[in-house]
Image: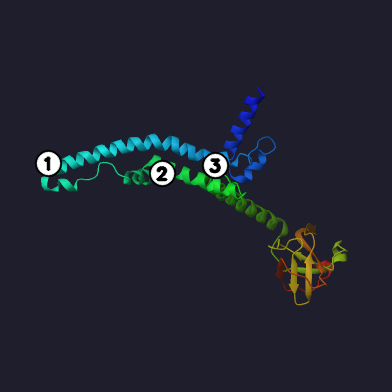
Amino acid sequence: MDTFAAIGRYAVAILAGTLPRRHWVAFEDRLPVTAMAVPSALLPMGLALGIGLPAFLAYGRDLAAANVDAALDLAQRSPEMTGAAPVAFSVLAFFLFALTTGRGLLCTYLTFAGLHRVLCAAVSEPRGDPLLTAADRLADGRLRRAREARAEAGWAAEAGPEVPDRLMPGTSVGMPEADLVVVASRPKPGWERGVVVITAQGWFRIGTPVDRRLGLRRRALYPLAEVKDIEVLRRHVTYDLPPRMPWGQI
């Protein structure tokens, strides 16, 4: 029973390996999905052989029969053209099958998709089926944009009309570790922890942004600490500091 259970686990892992790689983490605790990346990549190539070989042989027989009929018809109508009769069966039949028939196109995709996955696994970058991965990225992108749109709408409802940024001392908003705090009515893209803000007054590093309600309005607070030592910039934004405002005008 243990042997059958192990075989079942490996079989399911091979099937799970066709899913986009970002979904593998859901199975890794129970199944060796990553370890079975190469067998999983070989699976579509085996399917292509199993589906394509009998289909190609049947296609070849039909094509040969059609070519023979065409050759006989041509010979009857124009005996002098007998030497120019079409070839009954040639290597072109393979390409015609692979590129112009439904099963041929399916087998072509399975072959190249499997080869692509084998090469990726060989360089320690195993991946799932390319078509499923592309569809997953498209769907995830749409879902992410929809979530962002809902979040922006919810923020706008709580923050009210968009207003210019405010600048406050850190002690004024309960952030004594910050030299300055930028108070924004909307989240600022690219303003994340560790990003350096380059201004005419100096360089400042962003601390942990805070989502807070000030009065009746929702606000995004970005604590800034002055950067006093020269360092290599990895992530930075440029910004014009607004004038400092009294607490009551936030």
Of 248 and 91, the residue lying toward us: 91
Question: Please, is residue 250 above or below residue 68 in the view?
Answer: below
What secondary structure is marked by label 1?
helix
Instruction: Identify the mark nearer the N-term, 1 or 2.
Output: 1
Which sits in the foreground, 9 or 38?
38
Residue 181: percent from the left, percent from the top?
A: 81, 66
Q: Marks 3 and 2: which is nearer the front? A: 3
Q: What element carries label 2?
A: helix
Q: Mark 3 points at which residue?
A: 41
Residue type, numbered disc 3: Ala
Left or right of 87, for residue 121: right
Q: In the image, which disc is placed on residue 76?
A: 1
Which of the 4 quarters of the picture holds residue 167? bottom right
Residue 174 in the image: state x and y as whole percent. 87, 61
- Regarding residue 78, the answer to whether it shows in the image is no
Q: Tag 1: residue type?
A: Gln
Q: Position of residue 162 (x, y in %)?
A: 69, 64
Distance from label 1 to label 2 (Cα)?
36 Å
Q: What residue type is labelled 2?
A: Leu
Instruction: Note whether residue 85 is visible.
Output: yes
Question: What's the residue at 27%, 39% (across, down)?
Answer: 64
Based on the displayed image, in which of its 4 quarters is residue 50 positioned? top left
Residue found at the far top of this picture: 1
Q: Mark 2 points at which residue?
A: 105
Q: Can you say which quadrant of the picture contains the C terminus?
A: bottom right
- Distance between the alpha carbons at the discs numbered 3 and 2: 18 Å
